[in-house]
Amino acid sequence: MSLEQLPLLQQLMLVLAAVVMFTSFVLLEQARLVAAIHAFAWQGVLVAMVTALVAAGSGLEHLFFSAALTLALKALLIPWMLHRLVRRLELDRHREPLRRPALVIMAALALVIFSYWVVTPLVAEELLFTRNIVAVSLAVVLTGLLMMVIRTQAVAQVLGFMSMENGLFLAAVSDTDGMPLAVELGVAFDVLVAMILFGVFFFQIRESIDSLDVDRMNRLTERVDES
Amino acid sequence: MTALLLSVFTPLAGALLLPLVRRLSWAGWLNIGLATLTLSATLALAMHVADQRIVANALFHIDDLNVYLLVLTAFVGLTTAIFSRPYMRHVCDSGRVSERGMRLYHSMFQAFMFTMLLALSTDNLGVLWVAVEGATLATVLLVSLYRTPEAIEAAWKYFILCGVGIALALFGTVLLYFAAQHVLSDPALGLSWNALYSVAPQLQPSITSLAFVFLLVGYGTKVGLVPMHQWLPDAHSEGPTPMSAVLSGLLLNVALYAVVRLKMIVDGSLAATATPHLAGYLLMGFGLLSFLVATLFLHRQRDIKRMFSYSSIEHMGLMTFAFGMGGPLATFGALLHMLVHSLTKSAIFVTVGHATHIAGTQSIDHIRGLIRTQPAVGWGLLLGVAAIAGFPPFGVFTSEFLVLSATMQSQPWLTLILVSGLVIAFAGLFRHLHPMVYGPVPEAQQPVPANMLPVIIHLGLVLWLGLSIPALLSQWLDRATQLITGAHLL
């Protein structure tokens, strides 16, 4: 069975999932923080759209609610909070280009291939749709992880963390018709509290090292100083 | 059911109530009162479970395994609250923490207890995830409470590493849920541990094994397994001491409990495949690696709390290894080790808290002559370390002996590695301990007001467990062993 034979709705969802992955790449490469936040907001919109499509396809009411929740949280509230923080920290003109962009993109591509390599044998061939969407969401999760590793700027690391959450949510909603509502609310609450705490930490870190480059925090290591 | 709700939600009420209490002295006492109420409720629940075997509803599932950890958690929570009242007062008086910081501390202490108890009692794997992530959120601001550059660095590292780890665990949870979709009649039950466990043999093995890798890495980060352990020594050494006591004594246990529960499902699913012990082997590998790395790192520590956090990694590694090995003997040993390690390690952190106040520093090189300045603290530290190193009259010896005998039975060659690891750890601990306890007393070193009651209770219990395990407890642990392995030991 090839992709064209899938129902139109599922094809549309796959396209959207692919665009989510694309925004992950944009996020990874973005030098300006504000632009990265916008890319993240778009990713949130796309994930909410996938959720809404799943809801339309299955007719499950709680999925419409979770689509609205995703839109409110991931596409509006968190980007707005980050935007405000960046402005208050006077980082809106901050540019931080990647040191080796080609290498990073290659690594991200390798992660996408890896995700397909892991997922393909797992999911039965009949479930063509699920197979693709699980692989794509794993790729989004791993790209987010890569972003947290290569970026040394605290705000950019938080964006990586949040896009990992987007990937997880995409996986949960598209291949299982969504988690139970209680769990979904709990996860959303945790993400929101995490965001508030991240905001607190930006200020604490800046107070402590006068910058948000977390690579400069290197007091706690296992190196024994011979003093 | 009332006892269950009371034991889980008392701390939540406390977390919401305590920020409103403006008088610090009241807040400390209220904290103790709430912890006492929680402990009584868990004890009532334990009696109920002893009668009925299982107390369950849509959201909770209490059996012999988790009720035992619930009681332990509530108990250590209470003794830590007793210790933290005068201790944090001292910290506040010395100006390291503001009054707002103290309110945050009390509230977050209760919030942390709530997440721990919720994680232990819930039946829903999603709620388990939310609670374990919630534990990070509750403690991360406490790690940075002193606002020193080190504390902020430690907190950030803790936040990011545990956040990423736990995100991977969520992916594993989603995969399990996905695997359950095709098997369960009601897909909404797909996150219920009970439902998953009952259909485990039908779950697709390839998906559950991938899920387990993600879950192990995720929850393993919280257990402090090497190489995801980087946050642990930092968070333990920079946070306030009562926090170190509950992190080491409780959080690590709860994360390991999550891994064990998930292993039960995965084992059921893999039973009929070519690799039935995959999950066990993974646990053994990670456990042994953590154990060995931590014993070596013990030697090169300069900070007393860092040293004991490496000792926690060592013991968690040993337990993970024992759970991985499976079998009634190893599992019984691991369960007992969870108990004695929690009691001993929190007692040690309490003593270390007083020791750092006496010396005014956490640097091992500058803590000297404790036994002469304040015999109670000096002896407490000496006995605590003797207990954690596995000296015979204490309970840690018993549990380590059980684990070693189990290893001898199933993997004889690994016994050699384990024994040498224990010897190396012992040497590392005593090398640093001796000058701290005996050593010449620095000038102008004064005793501090110390509350050694929690230490005496904890070490007394550990000693008791080393001399004779009461029949009640051994039967309790045996029933938990039977739940995990399907076979009785006794």
Image: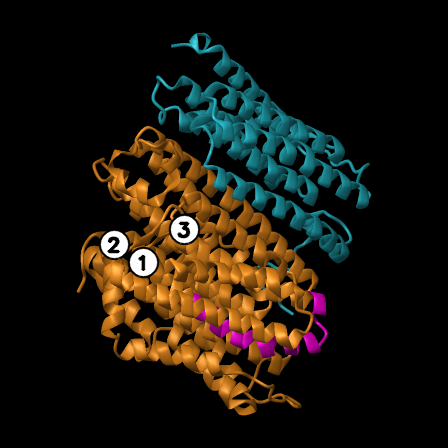
Chain colours: A cyan, B orange
Circles 3, 1 touching at the beta carbon (< 8 Å): no
Which amino acid is tagged 1? Leu
SS under mark 2: helix
Q: CA distance from mark 2 to mark 3?
A: 17 Å
Range shown magenta? B74-100
Query: Residue tagged by mark 2?
Result: B483
Above or below A104: residue B118: below
SS under mark 3: loop
SS under mark 1: helix
Of callouts 2 and 1, the N-terminal one: 1
Chain identity of mark 3: B
In this rendering, would B294 be left or right of B423?
A: right
Look at 20% across and 55% down and name the residue there: B410
> Which of the two residues, B385 or A89, is positioned nearer the viewer here?
A89
Circles 2, 1 touching at the beta carbon (< 8 Å): yes
Query: Residue tagged by mark 1?
Result: B65
Q: What is the quadrant of residue B63 in the picture? A: bottom left
Query: Residue tagged by mark 3?
Result: B122
